[in-house]
């Protein structure tokens, strides 16, 4: 991400990278807490994204948004709103009512978080992105205060009877994001997801 962002020019196409991570805790630049009881010996990585601590693992969709927001003519607030709206629209297509929470970026179903955002903007270029819990082991979230919020519960699509693969969810969410940002692209399943 850093190499791509540093090397891009004014005409470099924006990209979305879709993937899943192996089990890992990541700490954002604002994070001052640690993992409480890491009985699973999950690696903890310091990230240069914004935000607090979170967990990533198999069954969770990650989308890195490598965007020139200056060229898009939007600021950080509009970027976050657009990403959240995209997730809310996707959830709506599954019959779920996602919502925002003031002062806590991400998307929630009732009071449980289903999608998290962690972005970094440098010289008008955005990198890092969002995570959407699809069908994963959520127990590692119990060892942290997800996104710095004490007693925050997390949820996932499978908890609501939505049976979809991470790849399918990624393909669908990429399409919603492309529509929101008015990109003239065509997506294929082969292009939509990769593993890391």
Image (spheres, helix red, strand yellow):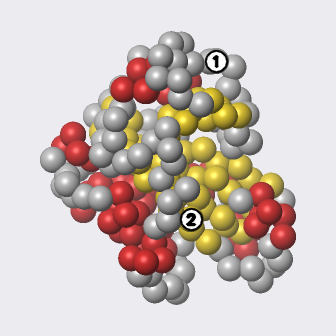
Label at residue 33: 1
Q: Position of residue 101 (x, y in %)?
A: 44, 36
Identify the residue shown where x is 54% and y is 45%: 117
Give yes or no for contact between labels 1 and 2 (Cβ–Cβ under 8 Å).
no
- Where does the image place residue 17, in percent across and percent down from the top left? 56, 65
Q: How many residues crowd mark 2 within 10 Å: few (<14), some (14–19), many (20+)?
A: some
| Residue drawn 68% across the image and 57% down it | 127
When asked about the image quadrant of residue 196, the answer is bottom right
Examine the rendered structure and indicate whether residue 33 appears above or below residue 77: above
- The reply to whether residue 98 is visible in this rendering is no
Q: Is residue 156 above or below residue 144?
A: below
Q: Residues within 10 Å of mark 1 (few under 14, many from 20)?
A: few
- Say which residue appears at 47% left-offset and 53% top-offset: 20
Residue tagged 2 = 17
Question: Mark 2 or mark 1, which is nearer the start of the sequence?
Answer: 2
Q: Is residue 95 left or right of residue 156?
A: left
């Amino acid at each position: 991400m850093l190499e791509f962002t540093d090397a891009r020019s004014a005409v470099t196409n924006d990209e979305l990278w879709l993937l899943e991570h192996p089990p890992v805790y990541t700490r954002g630049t604002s994070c001052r807490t640690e993992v409480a009881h890491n009985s699973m010996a999950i690696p903890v990585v310091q990230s240069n994204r914004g935000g607090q601590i979170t967990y990533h693992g198999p069954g969770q969709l990650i989308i890195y948004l490598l965007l020139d927001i200056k060229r898009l003519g939007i600021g950080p607030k509009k970027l976050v709103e657009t990403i959240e709206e995209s997730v809310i629209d996707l959830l709506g297509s599954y019959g779920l009512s996602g919502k925002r929470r003031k002062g806590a970026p991400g998307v929630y179903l009732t009071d449980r978080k289903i999608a998290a955002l962690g972005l970094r903007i440098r010289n008008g270029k955005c990198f890092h992105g969002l995570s959407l819990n699809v069908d994963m082991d959520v127990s590692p979230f119990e060892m942290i205060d997800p996104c710095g919020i004490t007693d925050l519960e997390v949820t996932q699509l499978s908890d609501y009877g939505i049976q979809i693969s991470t790849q399918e969810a990624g393909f669908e969410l990429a399409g919603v994001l492309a529509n929101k940002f008015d990109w003239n692209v065509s997506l294929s399943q082969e292009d939509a997801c990769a593993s890391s």
